[in-house]
Image (tube, rainbow, N blue to C red):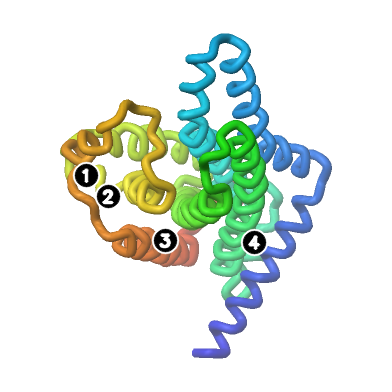
Amino acid sequence: MIGSIAKLWRGAAATCVFELRRSMSAQRISVTAGLALFPPAMLSLLLFGAKISNADGGAQMIDSAQFLAIFLIALVLLLGLLLWATPNVYSELEGKSWLFIACRPHGRTSIFLGKFMASVLVSLAICFIAISLCVLVIHHNNETIEPIKLWLAMNFVYLLATLAYAAVFSLIGVVFVKRAMVVGAGFLIGFDVFLASLPGALINRFTVRHHLQEIGIATMGWFFPTPAGSESEYRFIYGQVWPTWIHVTLLLAATIFLLVAGVKVISYREYATSDQR
């Protein structure tokens, strides 16, 4: 049992290292750098534009800077995971390497977990750079914030977000294969945008976004750009506060469940290669 787990871990780690080495091409590095630099660049432009337009607008934009940073970083994180996690099976089918992988002991599981690990590491690197630069921009425009506390809280939230969404997209990749990116984008719009925004609905507690949002409020404070007293209205609509450890536990449990489901699907499903079509 321990020997099988060790072999599985070595296979997954080898796949992860191979994927990271393959990502060292100029095209992939430029895409990764563009995603990492997009949030701080957009945040700087928005703050600069608001300052030169009028004083009131500049003050409002500074108050909303934390929310804008969170939104922009979440956007590039999800884009990065859509690019990295969803084509886990499709890229191997198109590269004609699937038959070799399927014949190896634990080959399918290793490729699934290894590509999951690679997508997590790349996405975390994107988030780390984006968060660090965004916190510097926010602190430069608003010295009342605590930059270290904000930086640690944002990295913690996005670590959980990366694990959860990478597991979701990896499962989508082994189920839908050819249309994985489209289904992943549809999942985000329908489930984590529409359903998570339904006030008073129990179903929004089954979304990843709800738990990340609650953890963010608990660790970073109230970051929504709304008038004073809106947090009480938020609680009236979305329910009372749960302990943060419950949200963290639910996200980690969901990640493990999705990974186990993905391993089961990729291990037993038959995929048609280009030679078999």
Residue, far right: 26
Q: Which residue is mark 2?
A: 206
Q: Name the foreground residue: 272 vs 175.
A: 175
Residue at mark 4 to residue at mark 3: CA–CA distance: 28 Å
Disc 2 on helix, strand or loop? helix
| Amino acid residing under circle 2 | Phe
Q: Secondary structure at mark 4?
A: helix
Q: Residue extending furthest bottom?
A: 2
Residue picked out by circle 3: 255
Looking at the image, which residue is at 44% across and 38% down?
Answer: 183
- Check contact, mark 4 vs mark 2: CB within 8 A: no
- Pointer 4: what residue? 99
Pointers 1 and 2 in contact (CB under 8 A)? yes
Callout 3 crowding tier (Cα within 10 Å): few <14, some 14–19, many ≥20:
many
For marks 1 and 3, the one nearer the N-term is 1
Residue drawn where x is 18% and y is 45% of the image: 239
